Amino acid sequence: MNDDVQLLESGIVDSLGTLDIVNFLEQTFAIKIADEELTPENFACIRQLAKFVNKKKSLVEASAK
């Protein structure tokens, strides 16, 4: 699968799937995803998800210092 395939628009992920992804990301990467971060920009495709998670991880690591 291409990292730029639109997950919601293509039907690969639905709204319940998005919640599963959020749960997985929060548990796996020790981040907290706020409701206002559940945007198409952050969850559109794998590439955007990775960018979003890296940003969140950087913020968590910076606040831990």
Image (cartoon, rainbow, N blue to C red):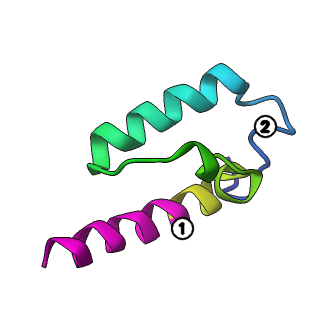
- Would residue 51 appear left or right of 9 to someone viewing this image? left
| Image coordinates for residue 24, horizontal then vertical, percent | 40, 34
Q: Which mark is residue 16?
A: none
Label 2's element? Answer: loop
In terms of secondary structure, where does tag 1 sit? helix
The residue carrying mark 1 is 51
Position in image of residue 25 (x %, y %): 40, 43
As for residue 30 lying within the magenta part, the answer is no
Residue 62 image point, x, y percent: 25, 78
Alpha carbon of mark 1 to alpha carbon of mark 2: how far? Answer: 17 Å
Dividing the picture into quadrants, the one containing residue 15 is: top right
- Residue interval drawn in magenta: 51-65
Residue sitting at x 51%, y 47%? 34
Amino acid on which disc 2 is placed: Leu
Q: Residues within 10 Å of mark 1 (few under 14, many from 20)?
A: few
> Which residue bears the numbered disc 2?
8
* Residue drawn 70% across the image and 54% down it: 2
42 horizontally vs 9: left or right: left
Q: Nearer the viewer, residue 62 or 4?
A: 62
Q: Is residue 65 left or right of residue 58?
A: left
Q: Is residue 42 left or right of residue 59?
A: right
Q: Residue at x 38, y 48 (%)?
A: 32
Q: Looking at numbered disc 1 in the image, what kind of residue is underneath it?
A: Lys
Earlier residue among tags 1 and 2: 2
Q: Nearer the viewer, residue 6 or 54?
A: 54
- Residue at 74% x, 41% y: name it: 7
